[in-house]
Image (spheres, rainbow, N blue to C red):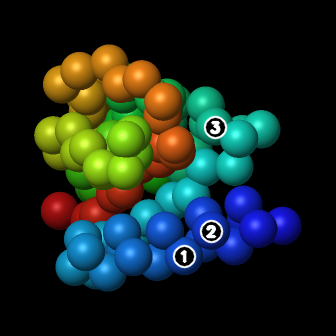
């Protein structure tokens, strides 16, 4: 229960920091599928028709710091620039272009 509340608080903080971009939280059991396609600790793939007019960004929190990948259009991948030890959570954000 505490983990779920903590994730919601983190998601709200990240959403505010992104200035209105929509954040999709990643429950551990469903961490490889989202509205815009596949995502993991290293990437977010913009592959669904739902995100044809959106850009997707991979986000990973490790060592207390949130690391953002580049924005990716339909058919592209937002790769993280490095592999991170001790990943606390990962997700992706998207917004309409």
- Image coordinates for residue 80, horizontal then vertical, percent: 26, 28
For the residue pair 92 and 86, the one nearer the viewer reads as: 86
Are the two marked residues, 2 and 1, in contact with CB atoms closer than 8 angstroms? yes
The Cα–Cα distance between marks 2 and 1, rounded to whole angstroms, is 5 Å
Q: Which mark is nearer the camera, 3 or 1? A: 1
The label number, if any, that marks residue 9 in the structure image: 1
The label number, if any, that marks residue 31 in the structure image: 3
Q: Is residue 21 above or below residue 60?
A: below
Q: Name the residue under label 2.
A: 6
For the residue pair 20 and 88, the one nearer the viewer reads as: 88
Quadrant location, the N terminus: bottom right
- Does any portion of residue 56 appear in the rendered image? no
In which quarter of the view is residue 94 placed? bottom left
For the residue pair 13 and 96, the one nearer the viewer reads as: 13
Determine the residue positioned at 62% across, 68% down: 6
In primary-sequence order, the first of circles 2 and 3 is 2
- Image coordinates for residue 49, horizontal then vertical, percent: 45, 44
Determine the residue positioned at 44% across, 64% down: 23
Q: Looking at the image, how many numbered discs can be counted on the residues?
A: 3
Q: Is residue 21 above or below residue 81?
A: below
The 10 Å Cα crowd at callout 2, few under 14, some 14 to 19, many 20 or more, is few
- Does any portion of residue 23 appear in the rendered image? yes
The Cα–Cα distance between marks 3 and 1, rounded to whole angstroms, is 18 Å
Label 2 secondary element: helix
- Image coordinates for residue 89, horizontal then vertical, percent: 52, 44
Identify the residue at the far front of this view: 63
For the residue pair 33 and 63, the one nearer the viewer reads as: 63
Label 3 secondary element: loop
The Cα–Cα distance between marks 2 and 3, rounded to whole angstroms, is 17 Å
Determine the residue positioned at 51% across, 59% down: 24
């Amino acid at each position: 229960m505490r983990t779920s509340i903590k994730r919601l608080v983190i998601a709200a903080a990240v959403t505010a920091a992104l200035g209105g971009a929509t954040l999709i939280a990643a429950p551990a059991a469903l961490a490889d599928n989202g509205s815009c396609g596949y995502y993991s600790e290293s990437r977010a793939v913009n592959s669904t028709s739902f995100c044809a007019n959106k850009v997707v960004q991979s986000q990973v929190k490790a060592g207390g710091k949130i690391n953002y990948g580049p924005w990716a259009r339909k058919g592209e991948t937002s790769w993280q620039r490095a592999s991170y030890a001790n990943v606390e959570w990962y997700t992706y954000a998207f917004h309409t272009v």
